[in-house]
Amino acid sequence: MKKYNGHLIGNVEDGSIAQELNIEKGDYLLKINDQELEDVFDYQYLVQDDHLDVLIRKADGEEWLLDIDKDFDEDLGIEFENGLMDNYRRCSNNCIFCFIDQMPKGMRDTLYFKDDDSRLSFLQGNYVTLTNMSDKDIDRILKYHLSPINISFQTTNPELRCKMLGNRFAGEALKKVDRLCAPGTGIEINGQIVLCKGVNDGPELTRSITDLTKYIPNLQSVSVVPVGLSKYRDGLYPLEPFNKEDAEKVIDEIESWQKKVYKEHGIHFIHASDEWYFLAGRDFPEEERYDGYIQLENGVGMVRLLINEFEESMKIALSEHMDHIKGLKRHISFATGKLVYPCIKELVDRAVSVCPGLNTSVYEIINEFFGERITVSGLLTGQDIIKQLKGKDLGDVLYLPENLLRSGEDYLLDDVTVGDIERELNVKVGIVKCDGHDLVSKLFDIHVDELF
């Protein structure tokens, strides 16, 4: 069994309780109220009390027992070297649809790490399969009331789930949802189904939705997203892409369930990701059907929100900045992925129609790195952008979508940086947020987004 050595403190906030008590970076937190801490959730739970006995080991090995009186819920101002305060749990599944298995060799090591850690569901919104979750983990979720938790269901058919996840315990793991959704727990859950053609679609999808509705209201939403298929699938489970007819059937199924569930529970519950509507060539649902965009991070409602924000900002721009827009002279360009390209092109053209001095180009980047079946902007690489835009008329600024970049960094999936793109294409690169307000702001060189 691993020896408990406490948790290394990586930073102390200025003006905090910890700083006043001379707790420093490099110290170790050993105990709070005589309890050892497994991870960040123990810390967040224990630190809420208004009286704490905190045991610290200084860098020289000396131990301090600090008697602290504070306001309830007031934080100590400690940041840990490891934000989770524990090792990340590696995925124990072998899913037939796993995108990490479809990546080429030679990328940075962190991109190949498969996590399946319920704690990251609360901290970062990651989806978990429950196969790594023990009864102790369920006890802690209920004790600390950790919510919401995001669960990748894929199917409620136990046998099929074992097959899809490549884990003989995957079907049994579904029983943990019963504990999380027991009366009185108050645990909120969002779900996901990665749909694979000929595997968990059709009657199996109907079965899954039927079963999952029984967990309302704890289970607040379920998104259905098509499997992503890269060109690196040699030796993997044979999966086929969905076509227009398939997408129409999926949408029809989901929308029929939305009507039924809304009548019974007042929520639409089951949602098709934007990719289905693009593939089917159908209009996107009205805003009300997205239940407050509860599944936005899963690609559900992003386009509807983008369009609505764009229209709101255009009204403000035309009413408050018309003189600026009439006199504007700009030559700029945008690059985006194949999936959302038609939508971005249409919105940019609408802006150009009211601003004669605005000269724009919108470029569709084909994902040659992962294969043309991967159409989302977030999986584009710098090398594809450079290759396909070399020699193009990019104007004074090339705008790239923010979701190309790793969080808080300036490099893309293939480690090509924004600076590399600027040097190779000889153009200034700007980053546009994935919302309609910022798109209008960038087009007209104003700050309409600050009003929202």
Image (spheres, grey):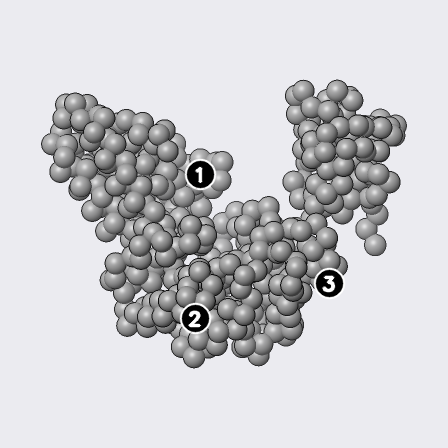
Residue neighbourhood size for the residue with mark 2, other residues' Cα within 10 Å, grouped as few (<14), some (14–19), many (≥20):
many
Q: How many marks?
A: 3
| 285 over 215 or under it: above or below | above
Label 1 near label 3: C-beta < 8 Å? Answer: no
- Of badges 3 and 1, nearer the viewer stands 3
Q: Secondary structure at mark 1?
A: loop
| 339 over 81 or under it: above or below | below
Identify the mark at residue 135; answer none if there is no mark.
3
| 204 over 26 or under it: above or below | below
Considering depth in this image, is 228 or 29 the residue closer to the camera?
A: 29
On the image, the x and y values in percent for residue 4 come to 83, 45
Quarter of the image containing the C terminus? top left
- Of badges 1 and 2, nearer the viewer stands 2
Residue pictured at 58% horizontal, 76% vertical:
158
Considering depth in this image, is 452 or 183 the residue closer to the camera?
A: 183
On the image, the x and y values in percent for residue 337 come to 31, 50
Q: CA distance from mark 1 to mark 2?
A: 31 Å
Q: Quadrant of residue 362?
A: top left
| Mark before the other along the chain sequence, 3 or 2 | 3
Considering depth in this image, is 202 or 81 the residue closer to the camera?
A: 202
The disc labelled 1 sits on which kind of residue? Tyr
On the image, the x and y values in percent for residue 181 come to 62, 63
The disc labelled 3 sits on which kind of residue? Asp
Residue that carries the numbered disc 1 in the rendered image: 411
Classify residue 322 as left or right of residue 118: left
